[in-house]
């Protein structure tokens, strides 16, 4: 029996103060759909689409729920307008994690 558990993810796309529309978020040419869940102990890959991607840098700040210190990961190009960031398996822990772009 596997000891891995599905976790809830609290994702927020931040550009100053942005109210999110459920399902999709847009800010300054960025489109990101937060994952609904993740598996504890597995790397989490976040994807975003960027308009004029050649002119942009995008980072994600993340932390396990219940902690106060934010870590940061950079997005890398994965296609013409698609970028991905990888959150290390060590931070994908119960009860979940939160992040913002």
Image (tube, grey):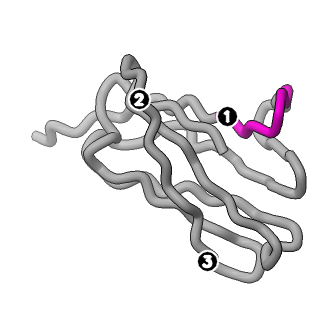
Query: Which residue is identified by label 1?
Result: 12
Question: Which residue lies at the image location 89% right of the left edge and 52% below the top edge?
Answer: 28
Q: For the C terminus, give its image quadrant.
A: top right
Determine which of the numbered discs, if any, sits on residue 65 in the image: none
Gap between marks 3 and 1 measured at Cα: 21 Å
Q: Which residues are magenta?
A: 12-19
**For residue 83, what is the image quadrant?**
bottom right
Query: Which residue is identified by label 2?
Result: 69
Query: Which residue is identified by label 3?
Result: 78
| Mark 1 surroundings within 10 Å by alpha-carbon count, few (fewer than 14), some (14 through 19), many (20 or more) | some
Gap between marks 3 and 2 measured at Cα: 28 Å
**For residue 66, what is the image quadrant?**
top left
Q: Is residue 52 left or right of residue 69?
A: right
Residue 12 in the image: state x and y as whole percent.
67, 34
Disc 1 secondary structure class = strand
Disc 3 secondary structure class = loop
């Amino acid at each position: 029996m596997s000891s891995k558990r599905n976790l809830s993810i609290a994702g927020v796309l931040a550009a100053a103060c942005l109210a999110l529309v459920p399902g999709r978020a847009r800010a300054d040419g960025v489109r990101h759909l937060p994952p609904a869940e993740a598996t504890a102990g597995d790397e989490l890959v976040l994807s975003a689409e960027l308009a004029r991607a050649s002119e942009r840098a995008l980072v994600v700040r993340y932390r396990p729920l219940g902690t106060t210190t934010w870590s940061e990961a950079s997005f890398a190009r994965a296609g013409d307008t698609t970028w991905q960031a990888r959150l290390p398996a060590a931070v994908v822990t119960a009860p979940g994690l939160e992040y913002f772009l």
